[in-house]
Amino acid sequence: MAKGTVNKVTILGRLGNDPEVRTTQNGTTVATLSIATNDGYGDNLTTEWHRVVVFGKGAEAIQKYTRKGSQLFIEGRLRTSKYQDKNGNTQYSTDIIASSFEFIGGGSQGGDSNYQNNNSNYSNNNQQSNNNNFNKQPQQQNKMPDFAEINSNNFDDDIPF
């Protein structure tokens, strides 16, 4: 990560259609998703559509366990690509490159499956990674002690005021 910058996206939404899954020439599975999120409330509710790209084993899981209407929690980064359309005009596409996701809700996708890929990189030709944690149980985190558990006798008496 470059100093002083952050490129992180977090969305929770539903698939607008079945995932588009393909395999690259080097054998990497790529899933392209159209995710809808809502903004506002009441009569002022609007829908925003997000294009999400998932690589490798994550794309395989997306293909196997999701369909139109499935709810996903996705974390990733934004990536803008430039291309020429059929008429030779320059077009831009901003995608979310997924680094992790969770299947939300019941049904065939389950509620506690998650995927995390620490090495996803849209422009890298070798997208497959051995550093992903698909279906890996989260590591146990150390619990902060409750306020009552802190021993007040451990504080230093040399307070400067």
Image: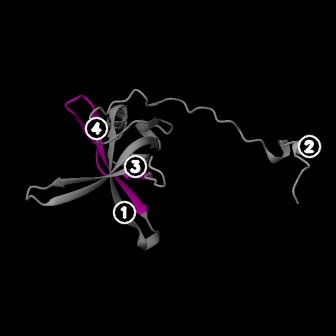
Residue 9 x %, y %:
43, 52
Q: Is residue 29 above or below residue 79?
A: above
Magenta stretch bounds: 10-38
Q: Is residue 117 above or below residue 92?
A: above
Q: What is the C-alpha distance between the residues marked 2 and 1?
A: 56 Å
Which residue is outermost to the top?
Answer: 130
Residue at image coords 48%, 51%: 3
Judged from the image, the secondary structure of the residue bearing numbered disc 4 is strand
Q: Which residue is mark 3?
A: 77
Question: Answer yes or no: do the residues labelled 3 and 1 have beta carbons within 8 Å?
Answer: no
Q: CA distance from mark 4 to mark 1?
A: 25 Å
Label 1 secondary element: strand
Residue under the point 46% across and 54% down: 5
Q: Nearer the viewer, residue 148 or 36?
A: 148
Mark 2 vs 1, N-terminal side = 1
Residue lying at the far bottom in this picture: please name it. Answer: 43
The amino acid type, in three-letter code, at marker 4 is: Val
**Residue on which the image places disc 1:** 47
- Name the residue type under label 1: Thr
Indicate the quadrant containing the C terminus: top left, top right, bottom left or bottom right: bottom right
In the drawing, what numbered circle is on residue 30?
A: 4
Image point 27% across, 31% down: which residue?
Answer: 28
**Cα distance, mark 4 to mark 3?**
16 Å
Q: Is residue 63 magenta-colored?
A: no
Identity, as a three-letter code, of the amino acid under mark 2:
Asn
Task: Decide which of tag 3 and tag 2 comes sooner along the chain.
Answer: 3
The secondary structure type at the circle numbered 3 is strand
Q: Which dot marks residue 153?
A: 2
